[in-house]
Amino acid sequence: MPRIKLQRFAENAERNDIVEPGKATYEQLSGRWHQEFFHNHHPLTLEVGCGKGEYTVGLAARYPERNYLGLDIKGERIWRGSKRAEALGLTNVGFVRMRAHDLLQHFAPHELDEIWITFPDPRPRDRDIKRRLTSPRFLELYRQLLRPGGLVHLKTDNEGLFDYTLEVLAERPGTTILAQTKDLYATPELLPHAEDIETNFESKYRAQGVPIKYVQFRLS
C-alpha cells in the first residue's frame, strides 16, 4: 500500500469526526448519534456513498442548524471529506466508514431525517441489481431508518439507473414522488429542492453535456 494512504489511514484513526472499524464508537452509536456524536438534537441527514464528501460538507456549511454524516467504504475518500470539513471549521458534520447494507447495525429506526444518494455506482449488470442503492432492499432499509415523513434524494447522470429507480418506486406501495426531472439544470424551479451543490462528478458530467437526473421521494 502506498505510504500516503497509510498516513491518511493513520490520521483517520485519530480524527474525532470519523467513525470506522477499530474505534470503540463504531459499534456503540446506533440510536445515540445525536447524544454521543453531535451532542445536540438537530435533524440528521445521511449521504450514502459520499465519496470525497463534497456534498456532505457543502450541505453542512449551508445548514449549520442540521447535522450531516457521509458514509463511504473507502478510508481515503472520507479522509478528504474530513479534511475539507476541518478547513471550513464545521462541527455539524462527520463521516462513517462502512458498507451501506450494514446500515441497520449502526443506526436505529427513525434516527434519520433525510437521506441523499449522489452519483452512485449504477451497477448496470443484471446480476448486480440488488447492489443498486435504490433497489427494493435498500429502499426498505431507508424506510426503517427515516422518521415518518423523511425525505430521500437521488442525483445521477445515469439514465438507466434513474429509470430503474422510478420503476421501483412506482411498484412500492405508499411511496410519494415529490419532484423529478431528467434534466435538473433545465428545470430551475427544482434546483432549490436538489441543492445546487456540485460534486466533482457532477461538474465533469455537466461539462460533457450529460443531463443530471434528480428525484425526491418519501417512503411510507
Image (tube, grey):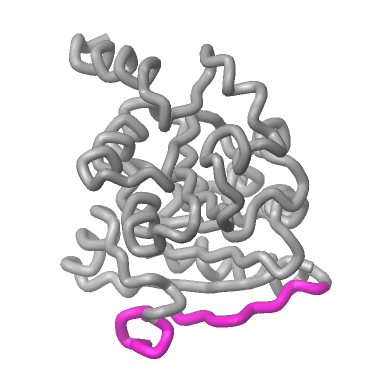
Quadrant in the picture for the N terminus: top left
Per the rendered image, the range of residues in magenta is: 174-190
52 is higher (above) or lower (below) than 47? above
Between 196 and 57, the residue placed more toward the observer is 57
79 is higher (above) or lower (below) than 5? below
Q: Is residue 190 left or right of residue 77?
A: right
Q: Position of residue 6 (x, y in %)?
A: 27, 11
Q: Residue at x 36, y 17 (%)?
A: 14
33 is higher (above) or lower (below) than 161? above
Q: Residue at x 61, y 51 (%)?
A: 41
Q: Position of residue 153 (x, y in %)?
A: 53, 65
Instruction: Please give the count of numbered marks on the rendered protein.
Output: 0
Q: Residue at x 62, y 48 (%)?
A: 129
Q: Is residue 178 left or right of residue 201?
A: right
Q: Is residue 189 magenta?
A: yes
Q: Residue at x 67, y 36 (%)?
A: 32
Q: Can you tell which quarter of the image residue 114 is in?
A: bottom right
Q: Is residue 120 magenta?
A: no
Q: Position of residue 165 (x, y in %)?
A: 60, 65
Residue at the extreme right of the image, as rendered: 173
Quadrant in the picture for the C terminus: bottom right
Q: Position of residue 96 (x, y in %)?
A: 49, 33
213 is higher (above) or lower (below) than 205? below
